[in-house]
């Protein structure tokens, strides 16, 4: 036999003995209340063990490739790159200043410091040693240029073979005079050698004239022996890595992975920061900064951990205070908060055992549990204290809560968990992990609500507050809303429709830098790096099996509109080396034995009188020259006349000194050019061993795979440039990889996963709700707050210019579960009521408090400096507010209108007022009071 109180509990809402869920929960609570101390003790011990397990086994992954499904096609390309080259994990040191020499000194100091910590850094790249490539620079030229150089060197062969001592101004001018005189006497055209001698003598005289007028203005009369394109790909490469204005330089160092740290490169990044701090006092005129993926990810991890911890504390404190104010007590609210903490500990242990780590998406799950898990406690305590206010015992009140709000709590919790679990059907690993962690957390909170909380309530007991009696009466939660349900429903729908029209303004922000903390130094330096040097921590990567393929790919990538530059080393190994080798060998042999500058200076000065006679003879060349040579010989004669005029302007002693100085400068200029040619004329072909080690280790794998880095012309942190860049590089190489590629494709995969999981979640939730209420109409009604709340939320986001981003999209499955949870409780209350439906004050207060605590829990994330985490708080708070308003205002109005049809049907069914089928006023009041 049931006691009177038990009968009252079971009669409320027509639950009856047939409600299996309520009967099961009532039986379960009896078991819990039979041994409350044992339940609380076991729960506490498991919580402590879970914390110990989490402290020793729970990791934190910041690499975004850890969020990607390993079976994805683009991940296979990335895995191949990591296997060949070890990953793109350079720490980038940036140095700013106005004096290049000071920056170079700082670079050398920093590089020396980095190389002194081999346990933390490897492959330090601060300058490029081009000596071996420069020595074989002639191989970089096309064959046509080599032929031209060879043709200029061949006429000098007799001089270079030991006759250089006989090369004087007089001999050079004499050769031109003899060739010109012979052509004039025979009235014949000059041969090729004669024309070259005449042209060389003309340039020589013009240069000499200029020098006679100004002894400091020497102008070389020699035709350049080197091609102007020589060294464009070698000597043109920077020895140090400077920006175009020479005010910014970078140093790269690859950090050593440390598995003992939370972040893979945390210790190396910390050491790098300490090095920067030590450098600043030594070089006070310079500015130092750090960026690169290891730094960005380490800073993001630190920021996320700090922000999530602070948000969790703020959330717990805020929710606890709100809880205590609402219930005007501290004992029972503390039971609910303690239950939540125990459930969170269980979740941490479970996550450690099943997943083993958190990622940047799941780092905030504890904070979300505070907002979600406390809802179960609020609903339970609201009904529990209402039952206590009727004079029921603690045990009876627990059972009453189990049979009345228990099914709604159970269905709401399960639907929320299912909303999370549906994300596990996506291909995005980070989303699957988040779905599993958050869904499991909700279930553990649900377990705590049905075990730990009832046990703690039995143990703490507490006084009965009769003031709660008024809260159990089915008085309208908001009388002014209940009086005009049609008007309230119409106005609410108009507001939702108006907000829904603004959804078109909603945008998606791809830029991951916008998710980082405000004022984060590594982000600011990354933006400077892109702006000043056209470089970035983000670039595409392509691999080739041969240097020929790498060069071809490099040319095709460079031709793309979205590509700014391509970095590769295959082009440093010239093509057609076997065809070029004879020319290089001939040039190398010709310039093998050159006089030194001291030997040139020791040559005897020219005889001024003899030289003057030679110049006068040129000036007196006849004018009856062959027409074909008229211009050349006329120029030669005029040049000689100008030289004689310049000599007459100087005293004889100055003439002798100036002419001797000119001859020395003239010979030094020639042999200087020949030495430069000698420096790049090593006849051995260019091989892999000649590549600078700093480049070879980064762009050529031990297995012989050649790497290309493709930098975008615009910042690929932004959505449109990123999409264009990825689309175009894929057109050249379908296996291209790199952070821009994996990020964009994973974002697309994540977005598609959200869409698929959303539809799946809606179907699963609808089925779960139907299982609880056994009515498709009521199931659809329960989902009304979710649908209308989401429309309103997206519209408000469009109006407020709040963008969706890779971080706050995680809020969507949360809102799915929460929105349905509100609707389930209202529909369950409607299903259990008689007559015209109004939202009772008891449930209304519980739902308001639930939404406030949930919003407060999520709003704590808005205090995060990490903008991605903060945006999660904004979207969650906004979504919960919209869904709760729809559940508290629009849905009750709609149900009130529908319940009038129910009343009319009931009246028509009993037109004669069958007393056996209706309740007396006193009976109705008794039921409603219960």
Image (tube, grey):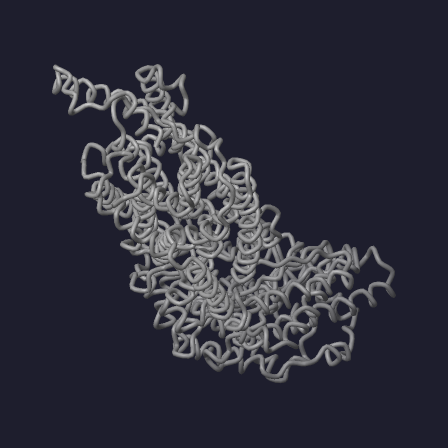
On the image, which quarter does residue 917 sit in?
A: top left
On the image, which quarter does residue 655 sit in?
A: bottom right
Depicted 292 relative to depicted 12: above or below: below
User: Toward the viewer: 213 or 742?
Assistant: 742
User: Toward the viewer: 689 or 482?
Assistant: 482
Decide if residue 222 is in sight here. Answer: yes
Location of the C terminus (image quadrant): top left
* Left or right: 732, with 688 as reference point: left
User: Toward the viewer: 802 or 534?
Assistant: 802
Locate residue 281, reporting x and y percent.
78, 61
Q: Report the label total.
A: 0
Locate residue 460, reporting x and y percent.
50, 50
Depicted 816 relative to depicted 297: above or below: above
* Left or right: 452, with 167 as reference point: left
Residue at figure coordinates x 64%, y 68% from the top left: 271
Depicted 555 relative to depicted 714: above or below: below
Location of the N terminus (image quadrant): top left
Locate residue 389, reporting x and y percent.
44, 35
Residue at figure coordinates x 38%, y 25% from the top left: 499
* Left or right: 348, with 693 as reference point: left
Locate residue 683, reporting x and y percent.
49, 81
Decide if residue 746 is in sight here. Answer: no
């Amino acid at each position: 036999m049931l006691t009177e109180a038990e009968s009252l509990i079971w009669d409320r809402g027509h639950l009856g003995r047939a409600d299996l869920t309520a009967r099961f929960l009532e039986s379960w609570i009896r078991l819990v209340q039979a041994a409350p101390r044992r339940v609380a003790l076991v729960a506490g011990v498991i919580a402590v063990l879970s914390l110990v397990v989490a402290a020793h086994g729970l990791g934190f992954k910041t690499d975004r490739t850890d969020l990607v499904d390993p079976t994805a096609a683009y991940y296979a390309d990335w895995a191949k790159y990591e296997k060949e080259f070890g990953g793109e994990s350079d720490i980038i040191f940036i140095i700013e200043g106005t004096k290049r020499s000071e920056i170079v000194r700082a670079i050398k100091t920093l590089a020396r410091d980095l190389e002194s910590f081999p346990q933390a850094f490897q492959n330090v790249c601060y300058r490029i040693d081009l000596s071996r490539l420069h020595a074989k620079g002639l191989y970089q030229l096309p064959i046509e240029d080599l032929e031209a150089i060879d043709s200029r060197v061949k006429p000098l062969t007799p001089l270079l073979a030991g006759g250089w001592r006989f090369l004087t101004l007089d001999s050079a001018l004499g050769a031109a005079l003899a060739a010109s005189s012979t052509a004039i006497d025979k009235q014949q055209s000059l041969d090729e050698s004669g024309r070259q001698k005449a042209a060389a003598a003309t340039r020589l005289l013009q240069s000499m004239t200029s020098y006679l007028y100004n002894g400091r203005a020497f102008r070389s009369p020699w035709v350049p022996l080197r091609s102007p394109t020589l060294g464009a790909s070698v000597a043109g490469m920077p020895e140090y890595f400077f920006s175009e204005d020479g005010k910014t330089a970078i140093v790269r160092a690859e950090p050593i992975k440390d598995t003992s740290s939370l972040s893979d490169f945390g210790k190396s990044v910390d050491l790098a920061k300490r090095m920067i701090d030590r450098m600043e006092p030594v070089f006070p005129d310079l500015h130092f900064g750090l960026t690169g993926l290891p730094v960005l990810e380490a800073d993001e991890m630190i920021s996320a951990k700090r922000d999530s911890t602070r948000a969790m504390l703020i959330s717990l404190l805020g929710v606890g205070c709100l809880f205590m104010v609402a219930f005007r007590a501290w004992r029972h609210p503390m039971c609910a908060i303690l239950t939540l903490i125990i459930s969170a500990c269980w979740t941490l242990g479970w996550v450690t055992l099943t997943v083993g780590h958190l990622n940047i998406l799941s780092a905030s799950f504890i904070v979300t549990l505070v907002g979600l898990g406390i809802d179960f406690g609020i609903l339970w305590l609201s009904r529990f204290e209402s039952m206590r206010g009727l004079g029921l015992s603690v045990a009876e009140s627990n059972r009453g809560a189990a049979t009345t709000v228990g099914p709604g709590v159970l269905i709401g919790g399960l639907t929320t968990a299912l909303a999370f679990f549906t994300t596990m059907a996506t291909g995005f690993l980070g989303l699957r992990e988040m779905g599993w962690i958050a869904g499991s957390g909700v279930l553990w909170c649900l377990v705590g609500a049905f075990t730990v909380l009832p046990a703690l309530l039995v143990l703490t007991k507490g006084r009965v507050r009769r003031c709660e009696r008024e809260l159990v009466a089915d008085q309208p939660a908001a009388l002014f809303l209940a009086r005009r349900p049609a008007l309230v429903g119409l106005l609410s729908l108009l507001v939702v429709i108006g907000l829904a029209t603004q959804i078109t303004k909603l945008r998606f922000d791809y830029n991951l830098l916008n998710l980082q903390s405000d004022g984060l130094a590594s982000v600011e330096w990354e933006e400077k790096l892109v702006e000043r040097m056209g470089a970035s921590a983000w670039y595409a990567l392509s691999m080739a099996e041969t240097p020929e393929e790498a060069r071809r790919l490099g040319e095709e990538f460079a031709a793309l509109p979205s590509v700014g530059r391509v970095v590769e080393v295959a082009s440093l190994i010239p093509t057609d080396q076997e065809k070029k080798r004879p020319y290089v060998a001939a040039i190398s042999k010709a310039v093998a034995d050159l006089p030194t500058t001291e030997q040139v200076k020791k040559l005897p000065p020219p005889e001024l009188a003899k030289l003057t006679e030679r110049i006068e003879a040129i000036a007196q060349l006849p004018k009856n020259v062959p027409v074909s040579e008229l211009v050349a010989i006329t120029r030669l004669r005029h040049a000689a006349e100008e030289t004689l005029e310049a000599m007459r302007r100087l005293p004889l002693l100055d003439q002798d000194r100036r002419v001797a100085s000119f001859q020395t400068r003239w010979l030094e200029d020639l042999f200087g050019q020949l030495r430069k040619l000698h420096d790049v004329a090593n006849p051995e072909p260019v091989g892999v061993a000649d590549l600078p080690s700093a480049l070879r280790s980064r762009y050529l794998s031990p297995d012989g795979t050649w790497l290309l880095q493709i930098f975008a012309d615009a910042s690929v942190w932004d959505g449109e440039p990123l999409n264009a860049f990825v689309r175009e590089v894929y057109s050249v190489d379908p296996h291209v990889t790199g952070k821009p590629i994996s990020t964009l494709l994973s974002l697309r995969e994540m977005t598609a996963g959200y869409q698929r999981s959303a539809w799946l979640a809606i179907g699963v939730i609808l089925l779960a709700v139907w299982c609880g209420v056994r009515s498709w109409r009521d199931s659809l009604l329960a989902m009304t707050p979710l649908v209308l709340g989401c429309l309103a939320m997206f519209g408000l986001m469009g109006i407020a210019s709040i963008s969706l981003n890779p971080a706050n999209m995680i809020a969507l499955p949360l809102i799915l579960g929460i929105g349905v949870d509100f609707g389930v409780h209202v529909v369950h209350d409607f299903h259990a009521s008689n007559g015209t439906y109004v939202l009772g004050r008891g449930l209304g207060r519980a739902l308001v408090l639930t939404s406030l605590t949930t919003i407060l829990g999520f709003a704590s994330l808005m205090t995060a400096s990490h903008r991605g985490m903060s945006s999660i708080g904004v979207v969650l708070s906004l979504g919960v507010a919209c869904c709760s308003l729809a559940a508290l205002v629009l849905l009750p109005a709609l149900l009130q209108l529908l319940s009038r049809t129910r009343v009319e049907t009931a009246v028509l069914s009993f037109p004669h007022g069958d007393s056996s089928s209706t309740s007396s006023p006193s009976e109705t009041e008794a039921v409603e009071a219960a």
